[in-house]
Amino acid sequence: MGESELEEHLKELLDWSGFDQQPQQASADGSPRVSSLLAVWLISQVGGVVGGKKLINLSEVENKECLRSLAGIAGLLHSAIANRRLVRKAS
């Protein structure tokens, strides 16, 4: 699954969740801007699905701006999932 497909799934998850979103503002990368609460919630939901409660350690994210956009979150999740697969294959 690519980052753009993951981003679409995150949008669907937000729609399904019933989170009351403000009119969607665009972030610097052009994708919908998300609040900190939504970013943490999305990351935890995906982490729960792939079996990693702490899939992304937020304190280790160097570019905090990527936590404020749907595309940025998708990129972080995509990298974290790929790294997890590499670690599992190596062991």
Image (cartoon, helix red, strand yellow):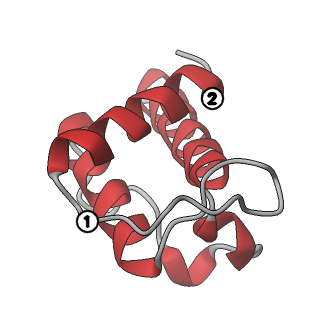
Q: Residue at x 66, y 53 (%)?
A: 72
Mark-to-mark CA distance, 2 and 1: 24 Å
Q: Amino acid at mark 1?
A: Asp
Which numbered mark, 2 or 1, is in the foreground of this view? 1
Residue 64 sits above or below residue 12 on the image:
below
Residue 47 sits above or below residue 24 on the image:
above
Q: Residue at x 26, y 36 (%)?
A: 50
Which residue is denoted by mark 1 in the rendering? 20
Q: Residue at x 65, y 73 (%)?
A: 61
Q: Depth check: 25 or 62 in front?
A: 25
- Left or right, 19 with reference to 22: left
| Residue most extreme to the right | 28
- Place residue 25 in its image quadrant: bottom right
**Residue 3 disc label:** 2
Task: Quadrant for the C terminus, please.
Answer: top left
Residue 73, percent from left and from top: 56, 53
Residue 33, percent from left and from top: 60, 63
Find numbered disc 1 in the image and state the secondary structure of the residue it sits on.
Answer: loop
| Residue most extreme to the top | 1
Find numbered disc 2 in the image and state the secondary structure of the residue it sits on.
Answer: helix
Residue 13, percent from left and from top: 28, 40
How many numbered marks are there?
2
